[in-house]
Amino acid sequence: MRALRMAALVAGLGLALGAQAADSDTWTLPVAVKKLDNGMTVVVSEDHSSPTVGISMVYHVGMRLEPQNRTGFAHLFEHLMFEGTPDAPKGTFERVIQGGGGIFNGSTRADYTNYIASAPSSALAPILWLEADRMKALDFSAENLANQQNVVKEEIRVNVKNQPYGLFFWTDLNALAFDKWANKHDGYGSFKDLDHASIADVKTFHDTFYQPANAVLGIAGDVTPEQAFKLAQQYFGNIPARALPERPDVSEPLNTKPRHAEETDALAKVPALAVGWKMPPRGSADQVPMMVLSQLLVGDDASRFYQGLVKGRQLLLNIEGGMNFPLGDGSDYAGPSLLGLFAIYKPNATPDQVLAAFNQEIAKVASDGVDETTLAGVKTKMLSDWYGGLEAFINRADTLAKLQTLWGDADVANKMPGWIEAVSADDIKRVARTYLTDANRSVVVRRPVAAAKAPAK
């Protein structure tokens, strides 16, 4: 669950910014983009400040496009990508990268699945060979499938079934807030659906989505665009593109009536609630203002909700949240998303009191906006997080590949700071009035079993 983070004080980033910092406090990231003949897009950011590279392979498929009755399939498939291929048996990927001092990881989100690595620049060619190899084919064996089915089920046990609150602020809130199956189902996965996944399902998914025309390769660090494009052509250029299925319409309007659900939790000791409001579409005029409003309301310990409800009214014990919470942020979604909150409240408080307090904080912004000093501070924090998230080569490659995938423009990395700076107090008021309404709000209350059984007083 990596978050994009950036830094406004460029001098503080030191050598990692290299010559790109120039004489100004605005860092322009070098971005070169090329599409191969088979449809795969390659994005390169050259930086010779360290003899290392970051690599990200992003496939434009995630939980939103997994097959119906196969919840968690995209997540399962991410695990299968590390089970080896006919030419590189299981363990080869790990030995090549870790043997040279590198690291790697993968993750599944609603709209994409990404595979990231960082290593000495001398290892770039072998890593690209490995990525191309598993794009061509996997070791589609019953043993590998069963192994990763069990791994994913164990993740569900650890993170959902045996944890207080069990990610209800993601899975259950989505199920309540959205109407289309693509947006509302549990992408983490159910045991029943995972067990029914077959070798044929896996192979079809790979053939359909894990192909050049549906992929973006990001490379950042000690390599020139010419070198990177040549290597990409060498290893990926001969992989034939296949026809992509038509993407379904997953769009949804804002909700017009409040939605509410009550649940119990056998492991929780204190009550909690999840709150979500449907957000503006990716790329709309309201998206970046909503990102700024999200930071203002729930971005950190200085936020209005934390200061107002945790420190001030002392209704809450804790609060987390943000746009696209908990699987991303305000810039890396393509379909419907929520501004989501997860709040643990004191047993002597009620959900209605907590919701009323949220509304009071929202109403202040919707009617009065925000003063220029506060707004400037919020923007500075966002810019710091944005630039900071681009400093490490592995994060830079990943951010560029994701922006190219979801926005169709990796240079959003350079445009976003200006968009943030341009947000006005009137923009903040507009999006607060439009999106953070009771009619567009979904609430899931999660109470401890003991509290739910206690007689009313």
Image (tube, rainbow, N blue to C red):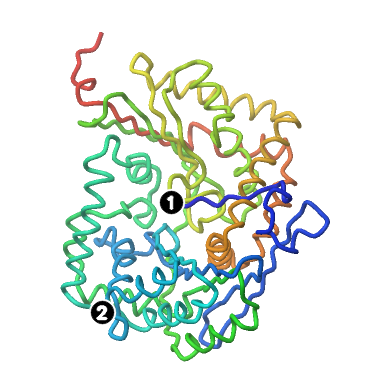
Looking at the image, the residue that sits furthest to the bottom is 238
- Farthest residue to the right: give it: 23
Quarter location, residue 150: bottom left
Secondary structure category for the residue under label 2: loop
Q: Circle 1 sits on which residue?
A: 1
| Foreground pick, 134 / 357 | 134
Where does residue 398 sit, x and y in percent of width and height? Answer: 53, 63
Q: Position of residue 153 (x, y in %)?
A: 21, 55
Q: Earlier in the sequence, mark 2 or mark 1?
A: 1
Camera-side residue: 261 or 148? 148
Answer above or below: position of 101 versus 141.
Answer: above
Name the residue type under label 2.
Answer: Asp
The foreground one among 385 and 368 is: 385
Picture coordinates of residue 276, whole percent (x, y): 45, 38
Assign the C terminus to one quadrant of the image: top left
Q: Residues within 10 Å of mark 1 (few under 14, many from 20)?
A: few
Relative placement, left or right, of 99 versus 5 is left
Query: What numbered label is drawn on residue 162?
Result: none
The residue sitting at 48% across, 85% down in the picture is: 236
**Left or right placement of residue 333 versus residue 77 in this view:** right
Residue at image x 61%, y 47%? 385
Task: Tell me the residue that label 2 is attached to.
Answer: 139
How far apart are the two marked residues, 2 and 1, measured between alpha carbons?
27 Å
Question: Residue, x 66% and y 51% (percent of image)?
Answer: 285
Label 2 Cα neighbours within 10 Å, binned few <14 / some 14-19 / many ≥20: many
Q: Residue at x 48, y 47 (%)?
A: 324
What amino acid does circle 1 point to?
Met
Give the image location of residue 296, x and y in percent: 61, 34
